[in-house]
Image (spheres, rainbow, N blue to C red):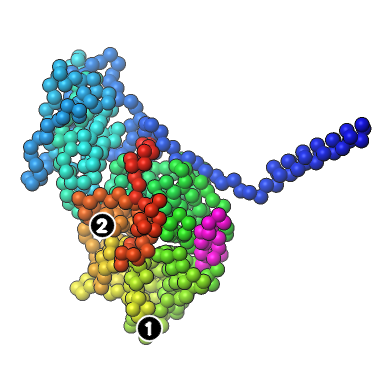
């Protein structure tokens, strides 16, 4: 009996020791994560948000013991253009003010509110407010804490704080109601005055990357762990909420493979978005990850630098992100993927070296060739840095960056832009258009976005011209455009305050897009005002269309991820 009891004690000790050892020395890293909160009512409010998009968390209410007698709109009203329809649409019984949630007014015992009208251009927002007369004669002016609704959400949406965001040309009615009174105004959404128009942003941080999921949703990332989410017509700041995941690290690139899955990379940081939450993934090597490009849920590349040398990570199924030997000795800044074994990367070159662009053929990395007067016949005297590369398909691609010649401190740096020619298998330099001020050659480039093989935009910086002692020696080269043959400054944008640099761009196939830059700059581009892009902008085109863009994907490649918006899935969209 004693021997049996001794054996039992020995077994119990071994089991306990095994459990303690397993718990204390588990080599599996549990990822940090923070859910992206999707509450039923707005809850996110950052202290540095711009006033026009601050979220009002209070429920619509009137002062205690007071009753509303009448209501009228009291914000400045911009009348619609002469071409806009002037007939006031009638309100159907199902959409009368009494049908608005929170409104107690009855269509039977109260007259419908008189409708005025105004125009709101695409690419802008409009702050609505009302004046309410109370039963004691008191007036509440510039009041927004009421129930708001847009009767045609395809044309424009209303936030709980009274901000109208136009989505497409057309007519809707905005209704405000509370305490048995209501006011209605007809809103005509008109074409934008500019193609690229600045949007209110909830941050002043520098933004480096952007991903346009659809016309209704986008993500942007930037300095200090900045993460913004565009949905329901507004940009929301998730930076503070995600700080336990990012630890304040800079985020440089973001890519989505569906509405509900994506990746973001930065300073020693890889993040995975899945099922409504961002989680931090263990990095296989220490380094700075500058860019990511995905072809689908299981195919993708991350590039950057580790210890001064280039680093490439490849997504390999259940193994996750795995280092891929490249032999590239300098930092890599950008990647563009158009096939499982077809990827291009660009990065920094050394002094007296040609630009650095490598192509992955499935087994090895091959350095691409260049041809033009500067590079082929005359060895560079300085060094190149390719900062952005976008392959339309296997035949056409674009790469931009800067050239830093010797004595650049005196003469200034130069912008560099190249176009890939598959027939000759070479990259050729794209020149500035005739008649353009030569000082624009000093503008360096940060990113390129193409809406077709020969139409797109190149992002640069505002710089001070070297060897220019005139009173106005500043060059505004933030946005350039190309027709496929030459480069010229673009003026089709409107910003309230020009930042030092435009840094990131994403465009979908019909031309709608987003640009981000320093100091929280966000520009939206409405190219086709009557086209709503809802298919989904995930991964990359494979070239099936004969052309392609920086990001996007034919549905035939991964139909399970393409083009499903929140309302079509039955899943609730975030309301923040």
x, y (%) of residue 294?
43, 58
Q: Secondary structure at mark 1?
A: helix
Image point 24% across, 45% down: which residue? 167
Q: Which mark is residue 136?
A: none
Magenta stretch: includes residue 369: no
Rendered image quadrant of residue 287: bottom right
Q: Secondary structure at mark 2?
A: loop
Please name whichever residue, 406 or 28, is drawn nearer the observer in this view of the structure.
Answer: 28
The residue labelled by disc 1 is: 376
Q: Which residues are magenta?
A: 304-324
Please name whichever residue, 217 or 370, is drawn nearer the observer in this view of the structure.
Answer: 217
Left-right relation of 307 to 228:
right
Q: Main secondary structure of the magenta part?
A: strand
Left-right relation of 4 to 499:
right
Rendered image quadrant of residue 355: bottom left
Of badges 2 and 1, nearer the viewer stands 2
Magenta stretch: includes residue 306: yes
Which residue sits furthest bottom?
377
The residue labelled by disc 2 is: 510
Q: Residues within 10 Å of mark 1 (few under 14, many from 20)?
A: few
Please name whichever residue, 463 or 115, is drawn nearer the observer in this view of the structure.
Answer: 115
Is residue 467 in sight in this rendering?
no
Quarter that holds the C terminus: top left
Image point 20% across, 51% down: which residue? 529
Q: Distance from label 2 to label 1 (Cα)?
A: 37 Å
Query: Is mark 2 in CB contact (under 8 Å) with mark 1?
Result: no
Please name whichever residue, 410 or 492, is drawn nearer the observer in this view of the structure.
Answer: 492
Q: Is residue 273 above or below residue 133?
A: below
Image point 46% across, 67% down: which residue? 341
């Amino acid at each position: 009996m004693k021997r049996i009891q001794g054996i039992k004690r020995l077994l119990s000790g071994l089991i306990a020791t095994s459990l303690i050892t397993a718990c204390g020395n588990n080599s599996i890293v549990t990822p940090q994560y923070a859910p992206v909160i999707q509450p039923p009512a707005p809850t996110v409010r950052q202290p540095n948000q711009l006033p026009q998009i601050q979220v009002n968390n209070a429920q619509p209410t009137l002062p205690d013991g007071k009753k509303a007698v009448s209501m009228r709109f009291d914000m400045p009203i911009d009348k619609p253009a002469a071409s806009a329809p002037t007939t006031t649409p009638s309100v159907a019984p199902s959409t009368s003010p009494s049908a608005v949630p929170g409104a107690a007014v009855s269509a039977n015992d109260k007259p419908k509110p008189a409708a005025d009208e105004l125009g709101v251009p695409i690419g802008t927002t409009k702050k609505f407010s009302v004046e309410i007369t109370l039963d004691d004669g008191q007036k509440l002016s510039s009041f927004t804490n009421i129930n708001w609704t847009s009767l045609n959400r395809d044309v424009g949406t209303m936030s709980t704080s009274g901000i109208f965001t136009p989505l497409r040309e057309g007519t809707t009615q905005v209704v405000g109601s509370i305490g048995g009174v209501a006011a209605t105004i007809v809103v005509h959404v008109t074409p934008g005055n500019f193609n690229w128009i600045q949007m209110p942003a909830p941050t002043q941080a520098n933004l480096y990357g952007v991903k346009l999921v659809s016309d209704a949703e986008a993500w942007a990332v930037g300095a200090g762990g900045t993460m913004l989410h565009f949905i329901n017509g507004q940009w929301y700041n998730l930076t503070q909420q995600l700080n336990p995941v990012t630890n304040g690290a800079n985020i440089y690139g973001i890519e989505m493979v569906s509405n509900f899955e994506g990746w973001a990379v930065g300073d020693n940081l890889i993040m995975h978005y899945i099922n409504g939450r961002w989680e931090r993934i263990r990095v296989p090597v220490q380094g700075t990850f500058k860019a990511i490009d995905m072809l689908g849920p299981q195919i993708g590349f991350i590039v950057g630098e580790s210890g001064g040398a280039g680093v490439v990570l490849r997504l390999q199924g259940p193994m996750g992100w795995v280092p891929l030997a490249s032999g590239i000795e300098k930092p890599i800044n950008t990647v563009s993927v158009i096939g499982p074994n077809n990827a291009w990367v660009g990065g920094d070159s050394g002094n007296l070296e040609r630009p650095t662009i490598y192509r992955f053929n499935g087994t090895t990395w091959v350095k691409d060739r260049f041809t033009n007067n500067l590079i082929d016949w005359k060895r560079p005297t300085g060094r190149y840095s390719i900062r952005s590369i976008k392959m339309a398909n296997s035949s056409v691609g674009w790469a931009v960056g800067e050239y830093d010649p010797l004595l650049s401190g005196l003469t200034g740096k130069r912008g560099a832009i190249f176009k890939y020619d598959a027939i000759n298998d070479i990259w050729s330099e794209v020149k500035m258009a005739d008649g353009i001020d030569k000082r624009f050659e000093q503008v360096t480039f940060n990113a390129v976005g193409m809406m077709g093989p020969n139409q797109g935009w190149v992002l640069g910086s505002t710089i001070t011209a070297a060897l220019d002692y005139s009173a106005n020696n500043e060059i505004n080269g933030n946005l350039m455009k190309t027709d496929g043959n030459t480069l010229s400054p673009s003026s089709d944008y409107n910003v309230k305050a020009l930042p030092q640099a435009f840094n990131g761009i994403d465009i979908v196939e019909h031309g709608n897009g987003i640009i981000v830059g320093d100091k929280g700059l966000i520009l939206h581009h409405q190219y086709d005002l009557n086209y709503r892009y809802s298919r989904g902008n995930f991964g990359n085109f494979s070239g099936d269309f004969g052309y392609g863009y920086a990001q996007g994907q034919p549905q035939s490649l991964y139909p399970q991820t393409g083009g499903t918006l929140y309302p079509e899935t039955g899943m609730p969209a975030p309301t923040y």
